[in-house]
Amino acid sequence: MNDQRIAVLTDTGSDCPAEFAAAHDVRVVPLRINYSDGSSYESGVDITTDEVVERFEQEVPKTSLPSPERIADEFARAKADGYKAAVFVSISSGLSATCDTVRMVARTMEDFPVVVVDTLSIGVAAGLVVMEAVRQVEEGVPLSDLEQTLGMVARNTNVFFTVRDLEYLRRGGRITETIYRLGSVLNIKPVLTCDEEGHYVIAKKARGWDRALDTELKLIAAIAEKHPKVRLAVSCTSACADLYDRMESVLRERVGNAIEVVRSDISPALLVHTGPNLVGVAVQGL
């Protein structure tokens, strides 16, 4: 129960499960997806992941952050709905200017204090931080403590992901031309993560898709051993949706201290940079 009337907001760079967001009134500010013909869409609002994939043959679009006006409107809407303050959980500042823009807008809000949390991560890992923000708000953690406590949560949350096709990571500058060419010729799949500053880095390399998936699981299990309890998450694009059960089953088998395994879809804005075949996993130390 949110007796403090603190709104929880996030962006579509953070994949919080839709059912959880709806049940707890998590407000989502969408990143934008832009095409060369001038058309522009709000990620997850007026364009879906499947629609982005359908247009890949014609064009891989660009993405952009929400406008300050769009962010301010969402804060104003939360205030009008009776909330007294807000916490905004953002995609990594190392990957997007969204976090800095939210901070700028937050400083302009009158009589509506806002705490901004930089997850230093992306996708389902950032989504786990959103979910923990909701729990802390509903448990009565005061606004003044949320930035510090959720900052610690973010530092204890890790993401790993891999893709079948390296082309989209190359186009987005996420991997070098050398890694792309070697990977394509030798069937080497990089497993990516976010470093302490929230930038993409390669955690491991594996030969072949199945080995890359297993490498993700091994990395998660190794981190889980360092914590008394963990919360896990799996995120797959629709083209890889058949892997949800397999990934969750292996995680439960290998990670004995997991209290939950969350599933979440991948937003259209993230799909632009990774392509239609992606599987990600996350671990949050508790």
Image (cartoon, helix red, strand yellow):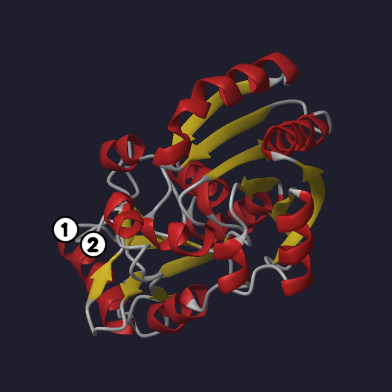
Q: Quadrant of the C terminus?
A: top right
Q: Between 241 and 143, which is closer to the camera in this rendering?
A: 241
User: Which residue occupies 77% across, 26% down?
Assistant: 228
Q: Between 53 and 18, which is closer to the camera in this rendering?
A: 53
* Residue furthest left as drawn: 80
Q: Is residue 220 above or below residue 144?
A: above
**Left-right relation of 241 to 145:** left
CA gap between label 2 and label 1 equals 5 Å
Q: Between 147 and 245, which is closer to the camera in this rendering?
A: 245
Residue 248 in percent (x, y) is at 57, 23
Q: Is residue 270 above or below residue 175?
A: above
Can the viewer see residue 269? Answer: yes
* Residue furthest front as drawn: 185
Q: Which residue is mark 2?
A: 78
The disc placed on residue 81 is 1
Secondary structure beneath label 2: helix
Judge the density around disc 1: few (<14), some (14-19), many (≥20) Cα neighbours within 10 Å. few
Residue 54 in percent (x, y) is at 30, 55
